[in-house]
Image: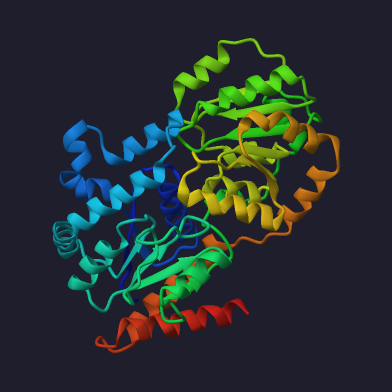
Amino acid sequence: MSPRKKIHVLFHDAGGGHRNAALALKAVCEQQSRPWDVNLVQFQDLTDHLDVLRRLTGIRIQEQYNILLRNGWTWGSRYLLRVLQLTIKIFHKPMVNLLARHWRGNPADLLISVIPHFNKEIAESWVSVYPNRPFVTVITDIADFPPRFWIEPIPEQIVVAGSERAAEQARSFGKSEANLFASSGMILRPEFYTEQTESLAAIRKDLGLDPVLPTAIVLFGGYGSNAIYEIVERLDIAKLPLQMILVCGKNEKLAARLRARNWQLPLHILGFTREVNRLMRASDFLIGKPGPGSIAEAMISGLPVLVECNSSTLPQERYNTEWITEKELGVVIRSFKKVVPAVRELLSSGRLRALQKNVRALRNRAVFEIPDFLSKLLDENDVEPADQPLAEKARVCARGAANAES
């Protein structure tokens, strides 16, 4: 028997999508009984002592990001992003050395990153220790936000892109069959693909909701947002024929505030949950921010989305609203102050049904496609000469994956 391969997956907790992608990849590999040991590595733990903002404030940079999301303090985030990138550039060499020491003491056959910003440092550190072992970046956004966000113009980085736009951006950075794999969508946890045994009406009844009343799930990622309260308040005053499932995530204060008030609309309020897939199956559409994870989960669940886009929208998420509009998968409004007319229009016309039809036409199988691609990378690493250029190995693997898809 061939020895088991070891894979490192780098993630962090700035937002919930990166951890979810790492967990999804590990889960599907285990479900498929792949002969791999998938090891999840928290990037912040490796680089804590280089975290300048933590030295100044005592708060990890990833937690500072989540505080901004919870409170909606995202105006001007484009400038904060560029400051972060400048800081990374200043600490480039110490970070490369730090990561290289870790890889040297913790060998693996393949390294995967599901985080942005640091891929140049990660790639350089990895190939300095293991020059013939692949490094893969799985983009967990619908598109890149260049420069220095996801895609780096270096051949050592193999990119997995989940949209036509991301694949085009990768090619503009010099990626080709040698170091680009185009998947059919964003990576999602395997449970979103499991067959549902409960009916929609049964789930709604279990949640204390009406089995037939139109239902919106309101979701702003794993850390919630105070915008949820404003949305509920506006829709409650309007007395629309609607009920809502409110997912507050880890924002316990928001959940308590919502529960403390008497609402006219039927509501089901909960905090952090691992049953988002079940809750989405009980809904007709999603209201939330245009985060790639929430959008992808809504799409696989057959839900159109209602999102806002303005100067406070995170810069890396603004293209997501263009994608929604171009593909006719939901409604984009300038502000949630306009949520009432937007929902009223959805409910009073055939618009919701038309959008649902478009959403259900999508076929996202990324979480199953990516392990097949990784398998080819690892298999080629076994049979090819040790000194074969990594780019050539990736080219063979990408070509094989493309042929398998066709």
**Where is residue 158 shown, x and y percent of the image?**
39, 72
Image height of 326 relative to 84, above or below: below
Is 204 placed left or right of 227 in the picture?
right
Q: Which quadrant of the figure contains the N terminus? A: bottom left
Q: Residue 310 occupies which quadrant of the picture?
A: top right
- Residue 175, can we see it? yes
* Numbered label tally: 0
Viewed as shown, does residue 187 lie left or right of 101? Answer: right
Question: In terms of image quadrants, where is residue 164?
Answer: bottom right
Q: Which residue is drawn at 35% across and 63% down?
A: 112
Q: Is residue 42 in sight in this rendering?
A: no
- Quadrant where the image shows the C terminus: bottom right
**Which picture quadrant has residue 208?**
top right
**Residue 317, image x and y in percent?**
51, 49
Please tell me which residue is depicted at 59% across the width and 48% down the height of the picture.
295
Position of residue 215 measured from the top left corner of the image (x, y, whole percent): 73, 32
User: From what the image shows, is residue 132 above or below residue 238?
Assistant: below
Residue at the farthest right position: 349
Name the residue at 67% across, 52% down: 325
For residue 239, side relative to residue 339 (left or right): right
Q: How is the image coloured?
A: rainbow
Q: Residue at x 18, y 72 (%)?
A: 128
